[in-house]
Image (tube, helix red, strand yellow):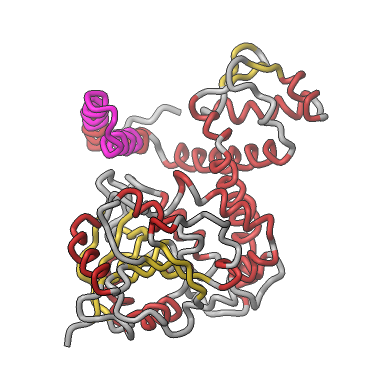
Amino acid sequence: MNVQRPESELMNISKASGRAFQSTSDYIRNPTSKALRQKARVAARNLLLELDDGDDTFFMVQELVTVAHAIFFLMSINALDPIPTSGSISAADLAARVNCSTPLITRMMRMLVCSGFFKETEQDTYAHNRQSLSLVDSGNAALHQVMKDDIFTKSWPALPEYFSARQMEEPNDPKHHPLGVAIGMDGRDWHEVLARTPALMTRIHTAFTGKWSVAPATGLYPFENLVRASEECAATGRVFMVDVGGAFGDTQKEIRLAHPELKGKVITQDQEKVIAIIPAGHLPSELGIEPMSHDFWTPQPVKNAKIYYFRRVLHDWPDEYASKILRHQADVMAEDSVLLVAEMVVPDRVQREDTWVYQLDLSMFMFSGKERSAADFAKLFESAGLELVKIWPSADGSTQAVIEGRKKRV
């Protein structure tokens, strides 16, 4: 039944249409700007929401859920691999390649084609488009499997069981979290879970490297401002930077290669079992990066370094535990030491420019971790004897940032 929309709603549609047109025009004039592209996407989405009624939005959510399940199933039987990156393949040929029936393929692919993944070049014949080619990327494929299988299919349905024995509050015990309940490993923190599920660990490593890496190593914090400090460190023997939980030292390699003007010794710390498997030659001596075995739950052995650096570490842990990690750094920091935390920062008001921060926050929720707002970081720092100095945001409109802190001044 056709229903006349109120005049106020039609005015909102008109305004949203104008904003979508303007922001899209701005992006076309500057197509290299990620920030302008995101602004145009948000404006287009806002226009769609103005055009939709409640039923449209409800069915859009159902469509997204159905598409996610269809993609995961087709991935699980390797049905997307035979689709050529150029050219097309019929449903019958695709079915033969993966040893299933043609109707099974056509029914799944209908959903993907209508939602914008893949295109139908003729009846029951499929080809890649720009959207579906993203699934060829190994990082995207792994990310989809982690988010869809390990997080959505297992952890979300386990929430009623998890909360049946607990208070209805955000998970704050790293050994008791929804994922552990979901896969029969309650009582183990998520690092222990990964150690016992190597396939999941491999998927997470593949998913969260490359373009899905949370917080880039360079381009946010102005390391070039610390050249003189690094030279003084080199001259006096003071450690310039300690990368806590730095694994193989890849982040420090990236920083050193981007800023060869920085001097002084850099230490990358991680558990002994991680440091022990750093490949020979992975950290060339000329970079000045030294691996060190260290458990960040214990006191920091490197005192008075200029910088104590964390990247993608604190969001793994609830506040009480993250505070303990930071306290070990605060205890050994000099008055001029700097704390740098490279992570996402949740906006004070909900925004649509970067929805990844909300998705990742609810994913970390499943391990008792969390993404934090500026206020959250300020409170966390204060609890550890630190104070927040400045947040260095991304220039592209994303929520990735570097949070700068220092020892709390008396």
- Count of all numbered marks drawn on residues in the image: 0
Q: Going 71% across and 35% down the picture, which residue do you hit? A: 78
Residue 264 point in image, percent of width and height: 30, 65
Residue 6 visible? The answer is no
Q: Residue 160's quadrant in the figure?
A: bottom right
Q: Going 63% across and 21% down the picture, which residue do you hit? A: 84
Up-down: is 404 above or below 323? Answer: above
The quarter of the rendered structure image containing the C terminus is bottom left
Residue 15 point in image, percent of width and height: 21, 33
Q: Is residue 118 magenta?
A: no
Up-down: is 384 above or below 97? Answer: below
Up-down: is 50 above or below 116? Answer: below
Q: Residue 105's quadrant in the figure?
A: top right
296, 389: nearer the viewer: 296
Would residue 24 be found to the left or right of residue 281 on screen? Answer: left
- Direction top: furthest residue: 122
Q: Going 34% across and 81% down the picture, which residue do you hit? A: 303
Q: From the image, give the main secondary structure of the stretch colored magenta.
A: helix
Magenta region, residue range:
18-46
Would residue 167 be found to the left or right of residue 7 on screen? Answer: right
The quarter of the rendered structure image containing the N terminus is top left
Would residue 380 be found to the left or right of residue 11 on screen? Answer: right
- Direction bottom: furthest residue: 410
Q: Is residue 41 magenta?
A: yes
